[in-house]
Amino acid sequence: MTSETFLQQLQDYYDREYEAIQLESIKHWLERFAGPQLDALLVRAEKLNKYLPKIFELNAAAEELGFAWEQKLGRAHPEHVWTPTDCRLCHGQGRLSIFKEVFKVQVDGGLQMRRRQTRILPLEGVDTMDYRYKHPTEEEYWCRCSCPAGDTPVLVTLGWPRYMRATEQAAGGVGK
């Protein structure tokens, strides 16, 4: 099975179609799987989902089947293990979602794109999911918190940038 036949069978099964942008991202994501894996993923997705599955639901099904990360990377996805802290920004996770509003500004007769930071939330949590849902046009950036939980080896290895508060930047601090 190819990714095109996988998508066609999935859309036929649910009698719905993906939007163009969803279709492209799912096609790109499906490139990591071989034919037999796509067969198993199709069966699993049809069992688990009442409606046409989103990419995160397909990813969850692939993880349950045991072949989500190993295909492209040649290794298992590193586990995020950390010691919780009492940080008010990340709530002890060490990972932050920074949301930025994108807007256009008239400058010298032309338009410029500008970004303004609107919200900082822990990467995982109900508040973050609600904010993503209510503000779908804002860009989201992930980074490590400046507390000790942000120093976990997996975040450093994956190359996540470190968030620095404005006071740390003014003092000349440099993110790790």
Image (cartoon, grey):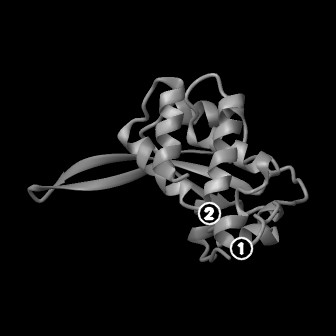
SS under mark 2:
helix
Residue matched to label 1: 74
Q: Is residue 77 left or right of residue 41?
A: right
Residue 13 screen position, x and y as percent: 54, 27
* Residue 152 vs residue 71, the one in the foreground: 71
| Residue positioned 58% across, 69% down in the render | 169
The amino acid sitting under disc 2 is Thr
Say if mark 1 contacts mark 2, CB within 8 Å. no
Residue 70 screen position, x and y as percent: 72, 65
For residue 59, say whether it is visible.
Answer: no
Residue matched to label 2: 167
Q: Quadrant of residue 160?
A: bottom right
SS under mark 1:
loop
Mark 1 or 2, nearer chain start: 1
| Residue positioned 46% across, 39% down in the render | 8
11 lies above or below 146? above
Residue 139 screen position, x and y as percent: 46, 48
Dot 2 surroundings within 10 Å: few (below 14), some, or many (20 or more)?
few
Residue sitting farthest toward the left: 109
